[in-house]
Amino acid sequence: MTKVTLQDPTPHSTPDGTDLTHLDPIPSYEGSVSAPRPNALQILGATWGGVTVTPDIQKLVGTSDKLTLDMRTLHRHLHPDPAPGKTKVLTILYRFQDDDSDSDLDNQFRLFSAAETAQPPKLTIARHAHASIQNSSTHSGGENGHGGRNRFFYHETLPRPWRAGPQGQVDILAVMYGPARIETPSVLSVLSNYFEGRWGQVRMNNAFFGTDPWPYERKTWAVYFRFVNGSRRVQVVTGWEDGALEVPWTRD
């Protein structure tokens, strides 16, 4: 499993005085890990402040079928802090091995996303927890947090993965930009083409996503995907706004 870790994205300089302020942030990549036992809550991927934290979140789950997080103190468990002084977003893609046997388990994924500033701060991932809080979610092009919605919290069962037609080689499972889930077909198409090797460098910013879901804040992004052929294991790449999507992944 390949893993690239993003350190503190604040400006630095080299010993010889070279200014590193304008260097692109380095995205972080990771493949999914196995759950500790059958029927447990399976963490397929997780990101926090522009780095992948899948093993850390699975460790917090242990052998339980639920996970309760206090967003105010999460930084104590996910250390070192990847971006001190910046408001970070946690994203988790997960499922239960014994989800409804009548459903297509291979396509059933649940997505949790919350900022450190989410209210209430104590949040739970459990088998039925998402059903009662779907109205607290935010989508790109939606209410953007107004009208009683919590714009810093998203928790739902995802629709079927997005694929670029019958010949598509990549399933886009979920795309998060700041606190919002991105569903714009043109954006998903570019990402799919990029992973399939038919697109050049992608700059992950407001212009690309076509929205600014968190004005005046520097946002992180996360893309969960899998290749249709091969192992079909979930992979995730994440980074900071204005960073380039250019991290290697595997097709096995």
Image (cartoon, helix red, strand yellow):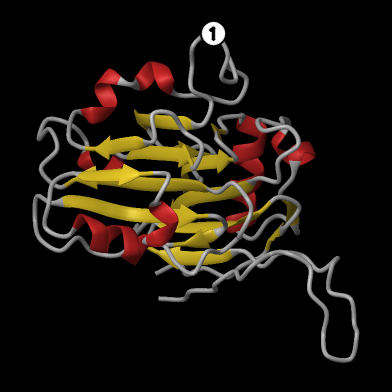
User: Does residue 106 lie above or below 121 as drawn?
Assistant: below
Q: Residue shown at 75%/38% (left/top)?
A: 206
Q: Which residue is nearer to you in this view: 128 or 19? A: 19
User: Does residue 34 lie above or below 117 as drawn?
Assistant: below
Is the N terminus in the top left, top right, bottom left or bottom right quadrant?
A: bottom left
Q: Is residue 71 left or right of residue 65?
A: right
Rendering coords of residue 127 (x, y %): 17, 35
Q: Secondary structure at mark 1?
A: loop
From where the camera sits, is residue 166 visible? no
Residue 226's image quarter? bottom left
Q: Residue shown at 37%/31% (left/top)?
A: 155
Residue 183's image quarter? top right
Q: Amino acid at mark 1?
A: Gly
Q: Which residue is nearer to you in this view: 241 or 72? A: 72
Q: How many numbered discs sit on the rendered protein?
A: 1
Rendering coords of residue 76 (x, y %): 40, 60
Identify the residue position indicated by label 1 in the image: 147
Rendering coords of residue 173 (x, y %): 44, 42
